[in-house]
Amino acid sequence: MKKKAMKLFKMLIPLKIKWGCQISIDIAKNEKLLKLMKKSGCISVLIGFESLNPKNLKLMGKSANLINDYQEAIKKIKEYGIMIYGTFIFGYDYDTADSFKLSLEFALKNKFFLANFNPLMPMPGTRLYQRLLKEDRLIYDKWWIDEDFSYGDAMFYPKNMTVRELEDSCFNNRREFNKYSNIAARALDFKSNLRNLFVYFGGNIVSRKEIYKKQGSKLG
């Protein structure tokens, strides 16, 4: 897979375009790949951090995220002028009310380009969906076609918080991260965000608008 990626990046170099992608954070261990990504025009990457709790990561099988030092990995990626879009999900069995605050502080401290904080989505056909169904924890049997389901709603009963706490805390994290004062503060990342200010501010303006537009809207 790495050989194919490197081949693609080399093909992109002559095109002189700017692009972004989704990666696993363990790419920070491969400087050769990072150098080639930068040279080929990569300016942003989406990383699914999902959770800062190792127990949750083990539960979801996210072994690539079980690294010793998140900060060093983030620093390494940014050294190549690449902005980071971090995503987090909440509601796993080891999440508590403190999980939201910790993730928000982590995203702000590391001056992520963008970040999203969402309720865990049990997708049909997955082991997670089957487990929650067996445990009688699904709020909607088929949330994806349920007329009562809206964007931002929780789809199941979490263990260590109420459904309302899960929904409201995710929404509050999104709003806090995208406050104008925080957008301005995050821009002051000299290695990545400041190098791509047009894309940075454009992406954040759209993200802030979508937060309020989508919340509570029906899927259909």
Image (cartoon, grey):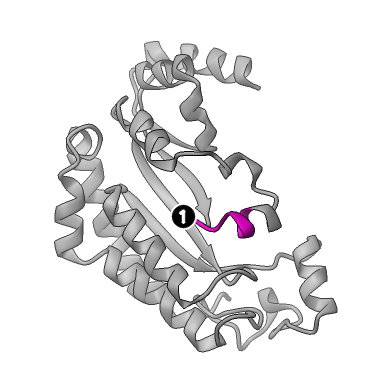
The residue depicted at 35 percent of the width and 23 percent of the height is 41
Relative placement, left or right, of 99 versus 59 is left
Task: Tell me the quarter of the picture where residue 123 sits.
Answer: bottom right
The residue depicted at 33 percent of the width and 75 percent of the height is 212
Confirm whether residue 129 shows in the render.
Answer: yes
Quarter of the picture holding the C terminus: bottom right
The x, y position of residue 216, in whole percent, is 45, 82
Chief SS of the magenta region? helix
Residue 54 covered by magenta stretch: yes
Quarter of the picture holding the N terminus: top right
Q: Which residues make up the magenta segment? A: 52-57
Q: Residues within 10 Å of mark 1 (few under 14, many from 20)?
A: some
The x, y position of residue 24, in whole percent, is 54, 37
Q: Does residue 42 lie above or below 186 as drawn? A: above
* Residue at numbered disc 1: 87
Q: Closer to the camera, 16 or 176?
A: 176
Confirm whether residue 217 shows in the render.
Answer: no
The residue depicted at 53 percent of the width and 63 percent of the height is 89
Q: Does residue 110 lie above or below 147 as drawn? A: above
The x, y position of residue 101, in whole percent, is 37, 69
Relative placement, left or right, of 190 versus 119 is left
The residue depicted at 35 percent of the width and 68 percent of the height is 174
Please name the amino acid that badge 1 sits on.
Answer: Thr
Q: Does residue 46 lie above or below 135 as drawn? A: above
Secondary structure, mark 1, is strand
